[in-house]
Structure formats: structure tokens, C-alpha cells
Amino acid sequence: MLETKGAARWGRPGEGPDMFRRILLAVDGRGSDEAATSFVTAMAHQSAAIVRVVYVNEYLVGGRGFTRSTPQEARSIVDDATRSLVVAGIPAEGEVRLAHSFDMPSRIAEAASEWSADIIVLGSRRRRRLGRLFGQGMREKVTALTTLPTLTVPAPLRLDRDLDGLEIPSVVPAETLTDGGSSGPERLTPGAPRPSRSAQRGTAR
């Protein structure tokens, strides 16, 4: 599900004033980059847009100048997303910026403003059982610093093999995978093999 912030109106291809001709894609080198890049590719094709990929490399707290990614890793993150866009026929370029954690939203907003972007696209991780949606605070802070519309693209659900060959999203809690005749819910250890329905029935008897 996409989340949109800011005032924006989708237009049809060829409708100039409402189209996003300059898209800023902020990547973070995590699982959401591929989904965000794919979405931006489709958007750029629709509106004949150009894209700038931005990666903000964060200084580690107490790291004495060290960053979360090495310069080579940071460049590779940008190059991977840029290459994917170019291969798809989208004019794209990329840059790496440096920032402390509390300055990262402003670096993204600055990059969009300096490049005269029409929209900012961010990737995000999906909500886990014991955590907030990754990047939610980042999205809110970027939105507060810019008048541009901001789109959030979540990473796709990961599917795991489950009971009797059925597939269910791995983000769904699995505490209640027991037969109706059992005495109570069975708590499963993450990563451990899950019993089949026949095994559960046998236990219940």
C-alpha cells in the first residue's frame, strides 16, 4: 500500500502541469530499494520523467567519522538503483550525501529542492510484530521539511512455505497454528520446522 503526503494530483501521460517530470528517489540500501525502484520506473515511464537517486550515508554515533556504509558500498547502492532505471530506459543519475542521523531528513529535502524535484519517493520496511514501520519517522520528518508530495513504497511481503504446501506471509504471527481439538495455542520458535496438519491431529488425539 502506498502512502502519499503533500498535495499532488495524478495526471495522464502528456498532461504537463500535473505530471511528475523530475522524481527524486531516496534509497537506503535495505530491502525496500528494489520495490521503490520498480515503482519509480513505472511512474517515470508514465510521465516521461527523469530520476535522481540519492543515498544519505549516515555517520555512526561515536564512530569518529566512520559511516554506516563505506564510500564504495554507498556508491554501489546508488549505482545499482541507477543502473536498474537506465536499463529500463529511464534517464537517471545518482549521488551520495553524508549526514548525521538527525540531519538525514534535511539532506533528502535539500537534495530534492536543489535539483528542483517534483516529488520524493521513499522506500520503507513493513511493520514487524514488535516494531514500527521502518522509516516512518524519516517520512514524517522529510514531509515536514518540504512542500513536495512524498510517496512511501513498502517492501513486498516475504512468503514462507507453511502447512500442507500453503503459502502465508511471514509477517503473520504463527502462535495459533493448532487443531481445534488441542488444549491451547502452540508457540512456535522462529525458524523451527512447523508441524503438518496430520501431525497436529495425531497430537490432539
Image (cartoon, grey):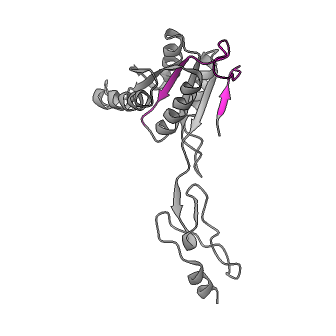
* Residue 13: in magenta span: yes
**Looking at the image, which residue is at 64% across and 36% down?**
2
Give the side of residue 129 with respect to residue 93, left or right: right
Quadrant including the N terminus: top right
Q: Position of residue 46 (x, y in %)?
A: 59, 26
The magenta stretch is 3-29
Which quadrant, please, contains the C terminus?
bottom right
Q: Residue at x 71, y 21 (%)?
A: 9
Residue under the point 52% across and 72% down? 194
Q: Would residue 114 be counted in the magenta stretch? A: no
Residue 85 placement (x, y as % from top left): 44, 29
Residue found farthest to the left? 72
Viewer-nearest residue: 102 or 96: 96
Position above or below: 175 against 47: below
In front of the other: 167 or 189: 167
Number of callouts in the render?
A: 0
| Chief secondary structure of the magenta portion | loop
Kindly tell me whether residue 148 is visible in this rendering. yes
Task: Judge by depth and name the residue closer to the eye, 26 or 17.
Answer: 17
Determine the residue located farthest toward the bottom in the rendered image: 205
User: Whole-percent x and y of residue 192?
Assistant: 47, 68
Residue 76 x/y as whole percent: 33, 31
31 relative to 74 in the view: left or right: right
On the question of residue 63 being in view, the answer is no
Tell me if residue 177 comes above or below residue 97 in the rendering: below
Instruction: From this view, report whether residue 129 is shown above or below residue 9.
Output: below
